[in-house]
Amino acid sequence: MIYVMSDIHGQKRRFDSIMKQIKLQPEDTLYVLGDVIDRNPDGIKILRQIMAMPNAKMVLGNHELMMLEAMMLNALYYPPPENEDWPENYYSHKRSLWYRNGGQVTHDYLKHIKKTVRQEIFEYLDNLPLNIEITVNGRQFILTHAAPVDLYEQYAYKYDCERDFAVWMRFERFPLMEDLSVIFGHTPTFHFQYENPMAVWDAESWIGIDCGCMLPDTGDPWSGSLGRLACLRLEDMKTFYSEEPYYSNTEETEEL
């Protein structure tokens, strides 16, 4: 069986709730469409769990990219864009962006683990694909965090590179995708439909699966919708939703 989830954002109890429901077998595959980390403390724990799973695959999300740009401090891989007038303290700006988007809790966790472990995490993330294409029961899917890279040329005026486009893009109008379906996260589904709690949005060629896992049970005051983690099984398009409440605390971080 093929399962897809996205935007876990450190909610380990909700992640564990999904894993308990789907009962992932060795012959199954779990695809995670980025944004495992940030906003809540247990993102790195979940990420390391995914890294250790031989039948789990992941694409890069904007939160993982923000961490890489802020933490790797490697101009060889993440140089300042040539067409932007960035100040000399480019990477401090990148860290500020990451913090404004919930990255400080992840950074605080990283400080407590061994340097070799941090490097393994960074290398894993740095090698993640932007899109994965699969076929299930004759139906073609593109799995991405925000957008298929094939559409980049249409939006190149907004983004410096395919990487930024694939993890940051938010569509106002979804272009027609012929003969395939795009499964994406990044944008909570209350932007496309009103369901309370939030639910997977299936528009045939575009399927949104970010159901606001990072939102508290009381509902986001902006959307009024209750968040939860969603998982989609592609063979029969069955949806699974987390049954655990939102939480913001974590167990004491162990030295690793």
Image (cartoon, rainbow, N blue to C red):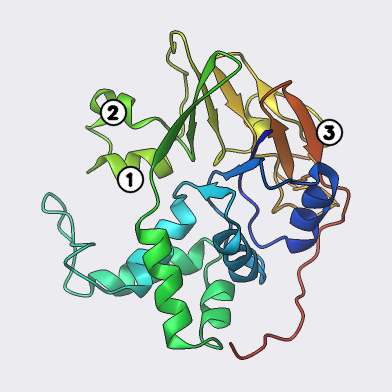
| Residue picked out by circle 2 | 155
Q: Residue 162: give x, y in percent of width and height.
A: 28, 39
Mark drawn on residue 164:
1
As measured in the structure, the alpha-carbon distance from the residue carrying label 1 to the one carrying label 2 is 11 Å
Residue at 76% in and 31% down:
199
Query: Is residue 58 in sight in this rendering?
Result: yes
Along the polypeptide, which appears first: circle 1 or circle 3? 1
Q: In the current view of this chain or complex, which residue is farthest to the left?
A: 82
Residue at 64% in and 64% down:
46
Residue at 77% in and 45% down:
227
- Residue type at tag 3: Asn
> In the rendered view, does 101 fall on the left or right side of 23?
left
Mark drawn on residue 233:
none
Image quarter hosting the C terminus: bottom right
Helix, strand or loop at label 3? It is: loop
Along the polypeptide, which appears first: circle 3 or circle 2? 2
Q: Quadrant of residue 115?
A: bottom left
Query: Is residue 38 in sight in this rendering?
Result: no
> In the rendered view, does 143 fall on the left or right side of 82?
right
| Residue picked out by circle 3 | 196
Q: Nearer the viewer, residue 219 or 252?
A: 252
As measured in the structure, the alpha-carbon distance from the residue carrying label 1 to the one carrying label 3 is 31 Å
Q: Residue 52: give x, y in percent of width and height.
A: 58, 64
* Nearest to viewer (mark 1 / mark 3): 1
User: Does residue 16 lie above or below 129 as drawn?
Assistant: below
- Residue type at tag 1: Asp
Q: Circle 3: is it few (<14), some (14-19), or many (20+) Cα within 10 Å? A: some
As measured in the structure, the alpha-carbon distance from the residue carrying label 3 to the one carrying label 2 is 32 Å
Along the polypeptide, which appears first: circle 1 or circle 2? 2
Helix, strand or loop at label 1? It is: helix
Residue at 87% in and 54% down:
244
> In the rendered view, does 225 fall on the left or right side of 132?
right
